[in-house]
Image (cartoon, rainbow, N blue to C red):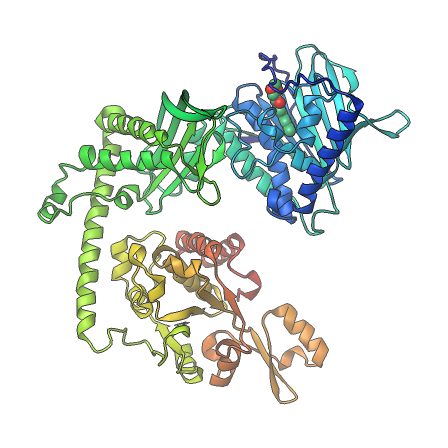
Amino acid sequence: MATARKATEKKAVSTAKKKPTKRSSTRKSSSNDYDQSKIQVLEGLDAVRKRPGMYIGGTGSEGLHHLVWEIIDNGVDEAAGGFASSIDVTLHKDGSIEVADDGRGIPIGKKPDGRTALEVVFTELHAGGKFGSGAYSASGGLHGVGASVVNALSSKLVTEVDRDGFTWRLVFLEREPGNYLSSGKFKPSSKLAKVKKIPKNRSGTRVRFWPDLDVFDSEAHIESEQIREHVARVCFLVPGLKVVFHDKRGKGSKPETFVANGGLADYVDHLSIGETITDIVTIHDEATFEEKVPVDGKVSTVTRPCTIDIAARWVKGFDTTVVSFVNTIPTSDGGTHVAGFERALSRVANEELIADAKKLKKLAKHGDDRATPNDIQEGLVAAVKVTVPEPQFKGQTKQELGTPAIRNLVYETTKSGFTDWIAGGGKKIQVNALREKITQAVINRVAAKQQLDARRKAANLTSTGMPDKLADCRIHGPDSELLIVEGNSAAGPAKQGRDAETMAVLPLRGKVVNAGKASLKQVIENTEAQALITAIGAGSGRDFDVGQSRYGRIIILCDADVDGSHIRCLLLTLIYHHMRPLLEAGMVYAAQPPLFATKHKGEPVYAYDDAERETISERIGVPFEKWKRFKGLGEMNVDELAETTLNPATRILKRMNMDDGKEAQRAAKLFDVLMGSDVATRKEYIVSNSSLIDQELLDI
Ligand code: TTJ
């Protein structure tokens, strides 16, 4: 992926064949009809203004971004169809957003009712399917709200089309179409303004809109980083498409150019982290399938074309990353295309790659010599994309491909592509390394399971089966909690200060394994991980049953320093990988211990950061010297610990979610990468690279 930073000029592209629009009406129009349709249009757009959440998910930054995606994706559709080669995205100082493509230009011919397709695109809900986006629309699924929704939620929108030797303009002021006269007055009308003469072969569409400040929250803001991410993804999906992004809101900004000529392979490369095992294998295929669709009330069979593109590689880590798309729409819940891909990998890996692996012979006796999808996908980074007209989406959020016939097509394509790679298309040394990795994954999994079974059996024989160091509570269930405490010094006061009825304390003594990179076997062999999994008592991995959790809340209690942050990240990563439902159910918390304490009128007062200490100092008139700084939890006495981290009425807990889990995994990786190198740089690097680590709290 090349990103250059220089201003670029827009190139013209020769116009391709025009597609006739299918919306002709045989009815004669009258001014009455016109007024009627105008009223209907405004009513339609008003419905959007009444319930913006239903169309764009909300009126905060996320909703604002939705508008931007909608307009950009219309240009992307034109590019994905081969009609446009470049898109410009500009954020203006006045809060407006401008998107321009060099495609065919939205049609400007008048329809019988006097309106142009251009006007209809921006005023009729769901008109998108007929104009800006066809059957391959990027603006499909949940995201495709239609350009009219953008107009509905904008105070002004200006669209210009370059076509037939002229630039044509239509302005929407508070949703109503028209144009500005030379006097500066706005004249409502369906007539396009002929702005200027241009070369005959130049074409394109430009849209600039001003989000309505009455609709959006005052804090709503467009993040340039999110635009970059969206644009980068789009470039991976439409190889060769050039997108120039220019955020003009700040001073001295420069345009940035995005282009990924390698398409999905560039994407996989972008997603690969750490040392690689194989090169990127790319597979491309074209096929057709039959689909039954209702046409005019009757079901008929149509033949659909389908292209399949796959890019995949294995890296040394254990995480699996499989991204998937239909046309240019991300399918974050997978679907039939991903199912076909995974099934083929399993089949080929078992039958062509590891079937004769010597190391597995011993396991074969118990029928344990087959690799599971998890074994095969350890360290896999892959992108699966199919291009089909009118895909069916399913699932609650419609982010899953449903078209059944696609499963088999992708299966066959993947099977032959992967088999060819093993049989000689790939470098021998890489094929062998992959065989070794998958074989090892099978061996580790079987060994880990045997060990777990043995431990469970042994645990059943002892009195409670619980780790020795666990100071358990008497009553379990939703109101009970497990406090995971770093180090021995804090464990004592925690045990004394807790309510032993409902609060259990688990002190950590040794190193917690980094579950983000460790194998299952390494996790199970790690004493601290084992103690935690046993104490929670709900199993781990696939077998984890959140309903069996012995506690309702899991609370991580770590020092407010770098080592504490590290341990918290490792614990969160462990939970994220092996007891994820706890995070999904919102049962995991991090305690926020104070950094400072002082006394005011005989009562203890706490501050959680420097800023708070300052405000409190001013308010109660206590000088800085009178504050005590806690270097760690171990420095607190029983009362202090009880009040600040144990007592539900006074303590501060932060609920951890899936994003925190993901972020912890990233942070844990950073800690790992930098362990052992120069300590000062290491700390600085970690701190500035993780949002999970509160920089203010760090003692550096
Ligand atoms: C539709 O079929 C006839 C030829 O033009 C096709 C079309 O509408 N292409 C098109 C739409 N290109 N670009 C757009 C578009 C671009 C932006 C930035 C915003 C919107 C709403 C549409």
Question: 309 and 312: which one is in front?
Answer: 309
- The residue that appears at 19% across and 62% down in the rendered structure is 453
Question: 306 and 236: which one is in front?
Answer: 306
684 vs 337: above or below: below
On the rendering, which quadrant does ligand 1 occupy? top right
What is the count of numbered marks? 0
- The residue that appears at 40% across and 23% down in the rendered structure is 306
Question: 396 and 225: which one is in front?
Answer: 396
- Which residue appears farthest toward the right when viewing the image? 183
For residue 375, side relative to residue 69 (left or right): left
Question: 183 and 466: which one is in front?
Answer: 183
Q: Is residue 66 among the parts visible in the rendering?
A: yes
Rendering coords of residue 700 (x, y %): 53, 64
- Report which quarter residue 356 is drawn in: top left
For residue 352, side relative to residue 602 (left or right): left
Rendering coords of residue 10 (x, y %): 65, 21
- Report which quarter residue 405 is drawn in: top left
435 vs 390: above or below: below
Rendering coords of residue 121 (x, y %): 66, 28
- Which residue appears farthest toward the bottom when viewing the image? 602
202 vs 40: above or below: above
Rendering coords of residue 610 (x, y %): 62, 69
- The residue that appears at 21% across and 66% down in the rendered structure is 456
